[in-house]
Amino acid sequence: MPASPRTMPAPPPSFGDVRAATEALCTPLEIEDYSAQSMADASPTKWHLAHTSWFFEEFVLRQATPAWRFLFNSYYEAVGPRHERPQRGLLTRPTVAEVMAYRHSITARMEALLASGRLSALELKIVTLGLHHEQQHQELILTDLLHLFSCNPLLPVYRETPPAGPRPSTPLTFQAFPGGVVEIGHTGESFCFDNELPRHRVYLQPFRLASRSVSNGEFREFIRAGGYTQPAHWLSDGWNTVQHEGWHRPLYWRESLQEAFTLAGVRELDEHAPVAHLSFYEADAFARWAGARLPTEFEWETARPPGGEVWEWTSSAYAPYPGFRPAGGALGEYNGKFMANQFVLRGGSAFTPAGHIRPTYRNFFYPAARWQVSGLRLAGDQA
C-alpha cells in the first residue's frame, strides 16, 4: 500500500528477487487458473502480474502503454480512467504469454536503469515503494487463489504440502500492561508506508492482552454454543450480515467443523492453530462471547505480541494519525483516501512475505471481509 516517497530509504538490492518471488507463486498454476476472478474483491493472478509491472512502468519508467495503462491501473484517479475491478476476470486478452513478456520486459528495463546509477534519490524511493507494493500483491495472489479454488466443486490443490503435525496445546494467559502515555507509529530509517506516520503520543488505560491468537478449537466452542444464532453477541451490522450471508462458521471450514479447505486441499483442522478467515464481525462477536474484547491497534502495537500466522483484527477504525499528510500526486492516493469505514489489522500472516512484517504495519479491510488470513487476539481492561 503505497506511501509518501519521502518516508523511504534507498531500495535494497533485491529487485530481481522480489520479481522472481512473484512469478514463483505461479509455478503450480495451469493456464486456465490465471484469468479467473471469483468475486469483486479478488483479482485474477494475471492481473496481479500485470499491475505490479505497470506500477514500475507508470511511476519510474514513465512510458506506460495507453491500453495497458487503462487495463492495469488499480484506482489511481490522477493517472486516468481504468477497467472496473469487478470485471477483471473478463480480460482473457492480453494473454498470459503476453503479460509475462510484458513483465519480463519491465524487469529488464528496470534492472538496467538501476544498474546505470541514473535514478534520483526520489526515484529510488519510488522503486522501494514498488517492491513493497509487489510484496503485498504476492500475499493477495495466494488469498485470491484460495478463494478461487474454494469455489470449484473439485476443490483443486494449489500446492501439495505434507500435513503439519498437531501442535501442542498452549494455555491462553493474559499479560498486564500499565497504560499511560505511549508513542505510536514508525520510527527509524527503514521503510514504512505513510499510514504508519507521523509518530505520535497516545494515552492508554491499563489493559490486558492475550498471550496468543484465538485457536480453531476455541472458536469451534463458540459455534457449538450457538454463537452464530445468538444476536446478543453481535454488533447490529454484524448480525444483519450473518443473517443475509447465511454464515454459520468461518470461511473455508467444512460443515463437520473438523476440516477446512486450504491451498493444499481439504485438511483436518488443527484445534491448536490460530483460527483464520474471520470477518471483523465474527472476531468481535467471539470476543464478546468470551467475556473479553478486541484490542485497539495502539494496545496491540504497545504490547508488540508475536505474530505472523494470522492478521489480527483490532477495534480501531482505520483513520489518519494526527498530522498525517498524504503525498501529492497519484502516489498519495492509495492509503489516505481509504481511511473510512474500515478496521485495522495488525501482525501479518503465513501468506505475508518474509521481512514484510513489522509492529507498526497497519493493514485494513472492511468489517465483512474474511477471505484474508485474519483472526483475533483477546484483550481486556485491568480491574
Image (tube, rainbow, N blue to C red):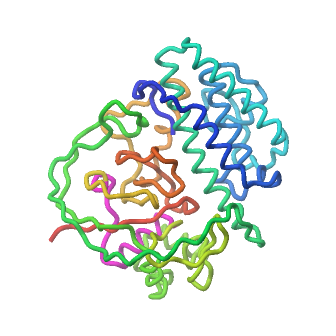
Q: How many marks?
A: 0
Q: Which residues are magenta?
A: 278-300
Q: Is residue 51 above or below residue 159?
A: above
Residue sitting nearer the eye, 320 or 14: 14
Residue sitting nearer the eye, 204 or 173: 173
Where residue 112 sits, quadrant-wise, is top right
* Residue shown at the point (60%, 24%) measured from the top left: 59
* Residue shown at the point (58%, 75%) measured from the top left: 247
- Where in the figure is residue 250, as x and y percent of width and height? 55, 73
The prevailing secondary structure element of the residues shown in magenta is helix
Left-right relation of 90 to 110: right
Residue 290 is one of the magenta-drawn residues: yes
Residue sitting nearer the eye, 55 or 202: 55
- Where in the figure is residue 303, as x and y percent of width and height? 26, 56
* Residue shown at the point (46%, 61%) measured from the top left: 310
- Where in the figure is residue 333, as x and y percent of width and height? 52, 33
Quadrant including the C terminus: bottom left
Residue 220 is one of the magenta-drawn residues: no
Left-right relation of 194 to 16: left
- Where in the figure is residue 109, as x and y percent of width and height? 68, 21
Furthest toward the top, the residue is 118
Q: Is residue 325 above or below residue 361?
A: above
* Residue shown at the point (59%, 45%) measured from the top left: 137
Where residue 64 sits, quadrant-wise, is top right
